[in-house]
Image (spheres, rainbow, N blue to C red):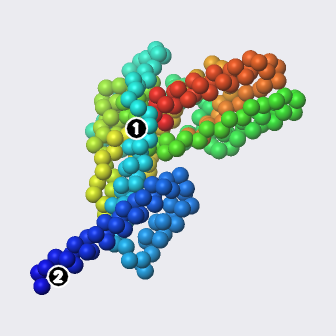
């Protein structure tokens, strides 16, 4: 009887392992296919499906963790970018022990607004900015086209941008805007020692460590992301390229009519610099 129980237990264990490996493999193969990913989750969540919820949690947790680690590995081990801009006067914020993220966001936005530290091309997550201000670039394109000019439009959309933000680089950018001392230490603490898990009541996966990224769902994270992306505007403007951004969605515009040869060179050099900066910033 004991032998039968052990064999049955081993049989069930092998079935669960096979299902877990099967669905993990499907998730990996469809990592860039959002529709199929939703279909897989729907299939696994179906109460009529004979798949334990614990296995689903573990499979999804493995998938999400592997997606980010694979992205990070693809960037290689590189020296993190540092700012060459002069450091503004240090800004010390009071009462950091009891401050919350909403107050932090409001204070940081005020600092950046008062000191013009965020590039005006960024319309995402900012007061008095919206998708409408981002669409002004369409007017720029129409104006150029109405003047008979040929226009190059390049659209950049980053994969898992919020999840791949390098904490060390972000702290460097924050320091360059004048946020130092307790303020900077608090933000570093906010980003560190985080973990994530998949929760499907009543089951949940084991926690996995978060080594990069800003927490999605936090009111502070969009402001931190804007700071992280801020060097991009100066990079493209060196090549006479117009930039408009909304969060991680970026439009690059360049007229090709007046001096096609020079414009082509600017476009090629500009995109190389963008690609180099993106890789160095692990985006």
Query: Farthest residue in the left direction?
Result: 2
Residues 169 and 49: in front is: 49
Which x, y percent locates residue 198? 36, 59
From the image, which quarter does the N terminus lie in? Answer: bottom left
* Quarter of the figure with residue 272: top right
Which x, y percent locates residue 112? 50, 29
Residues 116 and 260: in front is: 260
Residues 23 and 47: in front is: 23
* Quarter of the figure with residue 270: top right
- Distance (Cα) linking label 1 and label 2: 46 Å
Relative horizontal placement of residue 203, taking residue 136 as reference (left or right): left
Identify whether 214 is placed above or below 182: below
Q: Which mark is residue 4?
A: 2
- Give the crowd class for mark 1: few <14, some 14-19, many >=20 residues within 10 Å: few
Q: Which mark is residue 73?
A: 1
Q: Which mark is residue 256?
A: none
Identify whether 254 is placed above or below 88: below
SS at badge 2 = helix
Relative horizontal placement of residue 141, taking residue 238 as reference (left or right): right
Residue at x 47%, y 71% (from the top left corner): 43
Identify whether 31 is placed above or below 78: below
Residue at x 48%, y 69% (from the top left corner): 42
Q: How many marks?
A: 2
Residue at x 39%, y 49% (from the top left corner): 66
Asked if residue 227 shows in the view, the reply is no
């Amino acid at each position: 009887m004991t032998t039968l129980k052990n064999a049955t237990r081993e049989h069930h264990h092998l079935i669960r392992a096979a299902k877990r490996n099967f669905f993990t493999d499907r998730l990996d193969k469809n990592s860039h296919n959002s529709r199929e990913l939703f279909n897989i989750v729907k299939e696994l969540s179906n109460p009529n499906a004979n798949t334990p919820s614990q296995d689903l949690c573990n499979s999804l947790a493995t998938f999400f963790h592997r997606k980010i680690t694979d992205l990070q590995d693809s960037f290689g081990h590189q020296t993190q970018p540092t700012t060459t801009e002069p450091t503004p006067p240090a800004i010390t914020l009071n009462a950091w022990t009891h401050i919350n993220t909403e107050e932090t966001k409001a204070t940081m936005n005020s600092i950046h607004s008062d000191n013009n530290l965020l590039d005006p091309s960024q319309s995402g997550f900012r007061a008095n900015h919206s998708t409408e201000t981002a669409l002004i670039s369409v007017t720029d394109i129409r104006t150029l086209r109405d003047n008979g000019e040929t226009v190059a439009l390049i659209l950049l959309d980053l994969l898992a941008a919020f999840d791949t933000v390098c904490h060390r680089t972000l702290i460097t950018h924050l320091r360059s805007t004048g946020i130092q001392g307790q303020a900077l230490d608090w933000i570093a603490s906010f980003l560190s020692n985080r973990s994530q898990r998949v929760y499907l009541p009543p089951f949940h996966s084991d926690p996995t460590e978060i080594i990069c990224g800003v927490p999605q769902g936090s009111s502070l994270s969009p402001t931190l992301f804007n700071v992280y992306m801020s060097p991009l505007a100066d990079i493209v403007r060196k090549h006479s390229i117009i930039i408009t951004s909304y969060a991680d969605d970026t439009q690059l515009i360049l007229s090709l009519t007046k001096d096609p040869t020079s414009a082509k060179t600017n476009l090629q050099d500009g995109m190389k610099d963008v690609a180099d900066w993106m890789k160095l910033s692990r985006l």
